[in-house]
Image (tube, helix red, strand yellow):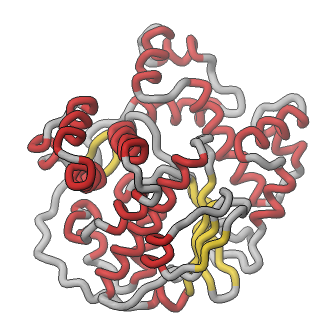
Amino acid sequence: MQQESGYKANMMVGDQCYPAFELRNLLNFIEIHLGETVAADIYQKIGLGPLELEAMQFVYVWQVEFAMEQLRLLSPDKEVGARLGASYQVESLDVLLPFFDQFTTLGECLKFVIQNPDLAGSFADTLVRIEDDMLWVRWLNTGKVSADKFAFQFQHSVCALLGAARQLVDNPVFIDEIHFASPKCNTPFLSSETSATMVFDCDFFEWGINLGVLNNQLAYQFDPINPKKMQPESISLIDRVLNGIRDGMPTPAKLDQFAQTLHMSDRSLRRKLSAAGTTYQKLVDQVRCQAAINLILADQLSIEDIAETLGYGDVSHFRQSFKHWLGYPPGHFLRLNQQTNPMPEQTSF
């Protein structure tokens, strides 16, 4: 029986819905560290006001990503992403709290966060694996994000998860190793905050933690939670396009054909996607890349068969496309991501 690879296509883009707590925490941090004028400018550019945001459960991915990018570009602190993540408080994670309140261990919380990007937020696809007594969470840059931006988002995620974990269990929690797919740089805050060994010039960004830590019992005292609707009220245009592309695989419709199914012109669809920070071709590439990763990691089909399954008439074209997406040809990618101990179908984390 095939074992679960641990790959999660979690990357969120454009007008997909993202938990509003992320944007609230982010703008509060920006106001403190960059000033009220910068925060007010960002509020204006994302089309929201503080009181409006306070009442929301979900916002758009592009709004969170825009604010994060402004913080990264305007702050002189190279570790500002890590500091942002470390500043989060559990009580601010509103849509997550009713679920955390049902769990008993840290591992259950981590598993929920990884498997529910619509509620926890995610800017990257992840590959989770177990090696010996370590659990590793590897980030895959399927969105072709710049190295500096990806590193910022990665450090933010690591520190946000670690900070929440420490509050949930009221116990010392540390990460064992953090790997960077970038040259060596100074990381005094990240090193101090996580106590992790930093390793640079790796194949991927990833972090590893001892499995025993995930067995820690939750000690956080949750306040009585008022149940609310925990899902966005309407499906986003990006989701409609992604679902349509997936349904049309291996030969998705051309942009003009797809626009007709949405009862709009191709120009209108192109403009709407551009406003959300993407293009139709990028979304087609995203679907193909994520499908290719799943098939490659399953290791049940030859590269030739995978290429045919994904609609490529020429296997060399598929190899070139995959290398463009993730930086490695399919065979080398599989060797880098084969697991010493594959994840069991029922895993405790």
**Looking at the picture, how far across and down is residue 231, in whole percent?**
28, 50
Point out residue 175 in the picture as x, y percentages from the top left corner.
51, 80
Residue in front for this viewpoint, 169 or 251: 169
The residue that appears at 37% across and 38% down in the rendered structure is: 66
Q: Quadrant of residue 223?
A: bottom left
In percent of width and height, residue 104 lies at: 34, 86
Q: Is residue 270 left or right of residue 18?
A: right
**Horizontal relation, residue 343 to residue 56: left or right:** right
Does residue 246 show up? yes
Front position in the image: 179 or 4: 179
Name the side, left or right, on which 237 lies relative to 55: right
Quadrant the N terminus occupies: bottom right
Q: Position of residue 344 (x, y in %)?
A: 64, 78
Residue at 64% over, 88% down = 133
Q: Residue at x 15, y 63 (%)?
A: 227
Q: Is residue 48 above or below residue 57?
A: above
**Residue 57 visible in the snapshot:** no
Relative to residue 1, is residue 175 depicted above or below? Answer: below
Residue drawn 72% across the image and 62% down it: 201
Q: In this rendering, would 12 be left or right of 137? A: left
* 210 w.r.t. 46: above or below: below
